[in-house]
Image (cartoon, grey):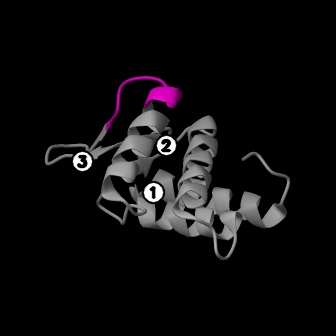
């Protein structure tokens, strides 16, 4: 979804800044995806847009993972970008709706 739309780029920058400071729940990502997909988008279109946003975040250094009880509080998933996106797609499909914060994955940028 690498688009030149400046609003989308601003949204990605916001999510990436947020991911550098904290763990980003997927509801924040799906909000951006909803704007990208447009009003009246189907579940499949929203899921596709969500995966595209996550893919763009991964391309910029963010990683999906799980929150854990021990330091540092986040464990990045192992595997490739494609494996991560397939996992998120499968878990989203199993939910039958877009994930909320705390479901499926968290996004973090560990580069800071």
Read off the residue under disc 2.
112
Residue interval drawn in magenta:
76-83
Q: Are marks 1 and 3 in contact (CB under 8 Å)?
A: no
| Nearer to me, 16 or 87 | 87
Q: Secondary structure at mark 1?
A: helix
Residue 53 locus on image (x, y percent): 61, 51
The residue shown at (52%, 42%) is 62
Looking at the image, residue 76 lies above or below residue 100: above
Read off the residue under disc 1.
21
Q: Are marks 3 and 2 in contact (CB under 8 Å)?
A: no
Q: CA distance from mark 3 to mark 2?
A: 15 Å
Looking at the image, residue 25 lies above or below residue 62: below
Residue 51 locus on image (x, y percent): 55, 47
Q: Are marks 2 and 1 in contact (CB under 8 Å)?
A: yes
Read off the residue under disc 3.
73
The residue shown at (28%, 45%) is 66
| Nearer to me, 112 or 92 | 92
Callout 3: few (<14), some (14-19), or many (20+) C-alpha neighbours within 10 Å?
few
Callout 1: few (<14), some (14-19), or many (20+) C-alpha neighbours within 10 Å?
few
Does 43 sit left or right of 56 as displayed? left
């Amino acid at each position: 979804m690498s688009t030149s739309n400046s609003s989308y780029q601003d949204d990605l920058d916001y999510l990436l800044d947020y991911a550098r400071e904290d763990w980003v729940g997927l509801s924040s990502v799906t909000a951006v995806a909803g704007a990208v997909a447009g009003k009246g988008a189907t579940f499949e279109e929203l899921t596709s847009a969500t995966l595209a946003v996550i893919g763009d975040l991964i391309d910029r250094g963010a990683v999906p993972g799980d929150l854990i009880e021990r330091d540092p509080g986040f464990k990045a998933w192992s595997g490739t970008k494609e494996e991560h996106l397939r996992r998120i797609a499968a878990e989203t499909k199993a939910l039958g709706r877009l994930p909320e914060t705390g479901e499926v994955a968290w996004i973090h940028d560990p580069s800071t």
